[in-house]
Amino acid sequence: MEKQARLLSSQLVQKQRLVEVLLNRSVLAWKEIETSRKRGSGISNISETGSHVVQVCEIIAVQQTEEDKVNTDTRGRKSRKKAQQHSKLHPHAFTVSYVRRTRQHRWRCCDITFHCSSQALSQQWIQAINEQLSLLSDRPKSLLVYINPYGGKRRGKRIYEQKVAPLFHRASILADVIVTERANHARDHLKTEANLEKYDGVVCVGGDGMFSEILHGLVTRTQTDHGVDQSQPDADLVPCSLRIGIIPAGSTDCVCFASVGTNDPVTSALHIIVGDCQPMDVCSVHNSNTFLRYSVSLLGYGFYGDVLTDSERKRWMGPARYDLSGAKTFLTHKYYEGTVSFLPAEDNVGNPRDKLQCRSGCCICQYKPQLDEKPCEMSKEKSDKDGSGRWCVIRDKFIAINAASMSCACPRSPKGLSPSAHLADGTTDLILVRKCSRLDFFRHLLRHTNKDDQFDHSFVEVHRVRKFRFHPKQQEAVSLEDLSETNKKMAFSPICSTPPACNYSSTHSSWNCDGEILPHAAIQVSVQCQLIRLFARGIEEQQQSVCEDPYTLAAL
């Protein structure tokens, strides 16, 4: 590693203590050099704070400190008197705002003020730091912000105004704010009206539903501008040039949790300010040659589809409707028969059970496979794995069919549906839960909340795929517990030409596509590798307060 030259170095005062401050192209560092003496003894005591290092790329802003704020942090008569003495010797100051990491992947904006003996020196430091910040080309300068005022607990507007807008103002980011007035307002505005050339990114304030609006609007606009017909299942979609920022303010914030590690608005705002970039795969969902929707998190048929369908009738209950509908669907315990065809990602370096979780700088997401796929005709056998690029076919009865393009982790399920799913490897994890007893299915669901392997069941299998199709069998779903009883009673029950409607369900389930119900059960899905980019960097493996540069510390 090459030693970087100092850009600026001075002895300044910080909290009435003399510190050596150094700036190079990578870091801003400071270390206390003044010792203090305990009263009544000749023992010198060096502060335990030691050296501090902040990466330049994580500095939010630097500005001159107002004179009336120079001594606001002092308490007590003696402290104020001592501060006044220091103020006379060092009357000028500048404040650096930077990112500090706290627990559970949360970031906070912290300030540190340095006092100088001259105005010229203070301005020199401000200019030097601003020059380095101006070289960070990934940082946004202008953003288009959409706020959903009705999502979650209706806190979106307040969260933005109180927590996010002040940070954007401090970082000199201009934001055009649109408060949505109806469903799909943001999607429709992005598709046709928005002048995207004047922005460096699009930010949504809301939950996963609001993010889905932004996703559909931005992707559709990009394909329209490039003349791509997104209704064709095999179309090569053009990646979006603008990044998407997510300020979590909904009842569910799965995408934010999976890409940042926490559902904290301040953390997400700071990721936007520093210009982080996390590519993300998007699944395109079609029925024949009809485009249905895009998905980035969960496609669920059977259990999760039935939960969403039932919960839509209980929207008046708020988020509690998911708990009630989940319990009702579990007790009903239906299975659905159909055919699943999928193209395995045989050239992928990972697999769904390798326990290699997607983290910041993920090597699996950075791996670029050769996608020379030549799918053959689907086999009539149960499975066909004769060679590379061949489709596999499974016909069976399923309680749930899930496709997870990310871990789908959330506070209730810290590991998610597929803990080793990756954000940007061009695949989705296809999870097939076959017909089983209610107790076995409960054990499978329970493992989503603990550290046990949720795929370690004989009735569960998982495949990492690039494409898949599903065709339902047109017959009525049956409750497993009622099936045996029905067969026993057939010989003793009177013949009835019109069976009671309450004992039968619809002929098939519905697909839950990122919280929206699809109108068709027969679908085909293709993973569009790294179609969008987020203002995020993935979940950081280690929580470090600073990144120390040994050369900087040695220089100090």
Image: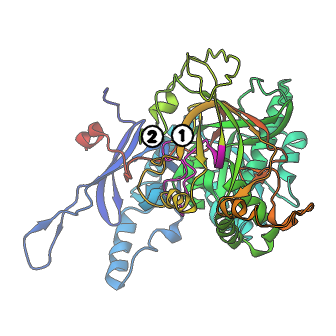
Dot 2 alpha-carbon crowd within 10 angstroms: few under 14, some 14 to 19, many 20 or more: some
Residue for point 27% across, 60% down:
49
- Closer to the camera, 198 or 122? 198
Taking the view exactly as shown, the residue that stands out farthest to the front is 491
Dot 1 alpha-carbon crowd within 10 angstroms: few under 14, some 14 to 19, many 20 or more: some
Question: Where does the magenta region start and end?
Answer: 397-420
Check disc 1 and report its element: helix, strand or loop.
strand
Taking the view exactly as shown, the residue that stands out farthest to the bottom is 77
Res. 422 in view: no
| Up/down of 529 relative to 182, above or below | above
| Up/down of 378 relative to 350, above or below | above
Check disc 2 and report its element: helix, strand or loop.
loop
Q: Which residue position holds label 2?
A: 353
CA gap between label 1 and label 2 equals 8 Å
* Rendered image: mark on residue 462: 1
Residue for point 40% across, 47% down:
541
Q: Amino acid at mark 2?
A: Arg
| Up/down of 457 relative to 279, above or below | below
- Closer to the camera, 488 or 129? 488
Residue 365, how many percent across, how many down? 52, 32
Report which quarter residue 227 is drawn in: top right
Q: Amino acid at mark 1?
A: Val
Q: Report whether 284 appears left or right of 345.
A: right
Q: Are marks 1 and 2 in contact (CB under 8 Å)?
A: yes
